[in-house]
Image (cartoon, grey):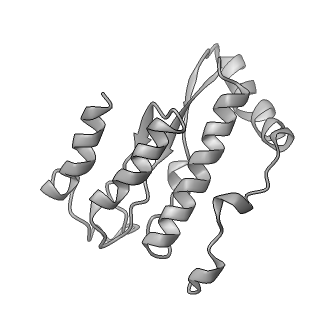
Amino acid sequence: LADSALTPSRAELRVGDDALRESVEPNQLRLMDERGIDLTVFSPRASFMAHHVGDFATSAAWAALCNDLCHRVSRLYPERFAPAAMLPQSPGVDPATCVPELTRAVEELGAVAVNLNPDPSGGHWSAPPLTDRSWYPVYEKLVEYD
């Protein structure tokens, strides 16, 4: 985390479609079938968003990787999953920095929802609340996308 030269890139992600199927079919799809669920909004796992780990570059890389994987799962099972996305929130960083990943997630990945973390500080509650005006650029973009 301390060396930005070691930040993983989306191009380096090496998870094949078979590995995604092997992960999703015995877990999410099985549970959906058992419970009679036709469609799930598929998002990064909230507890693994870890916005408090690293800096904004870390959050941006992690968000992009996770969003790409959710998109890929939704393409493998388009009748079962609609993609959602996480935003690269980071403590002490203006929420407006999330807008480019929000735009990419909706326009390139087809995201139908996003996860907003009300506390990117990881339990310290040092960031402005979701009602703060600093969030308005994110909300304006969400309204634009309806």
* In the image: residue 46, left or right of residue 103: right
Q: Quadrant of the N terminus?
A: bottom right
Q: Residue at x 71, y 18 (%)?
A: 34
* In the image: residue 120, left or right of residue 54: left
Horizontal and vertical percent position of residue 54:
49, 76
- Residue located farthest toward the bottom when viewing the structure as drawn: 2
Q: Residue at x 21, y 63 (%)?
A: 128
Q: Residue at x 68, y 35 (%)?
A: 73
Closer to us: 141 or 44: 141
Q: Residue at x 28, y 41 (%)?
A: 141
> Taking 44 as reference, is 26 above or below it?
above
* In the image: residue 73, left or right of residue 116: right
> Taking 139 as reference, is 65 above or below it?
below
Asked whether the viewer can see residue 1, the reply is no
Horizontal and vertical percent position of residue 92:
29, 73
Closer to us: 7 or 133: 7
Q: Quadrant of the C terminus?
A: top left
Horizontal and vertical percent position of residue 24:
75, 35
Asked whether the viewer can see residue 65, the reply is yes
Horizontal and vertical percent position of residue 6:
65, 79
Closer to us: 50 or 109: 109
> Taking 128 as reference, is 73 above or below it?
above
> Taking 134 as reference, is 121 above or below it?
below
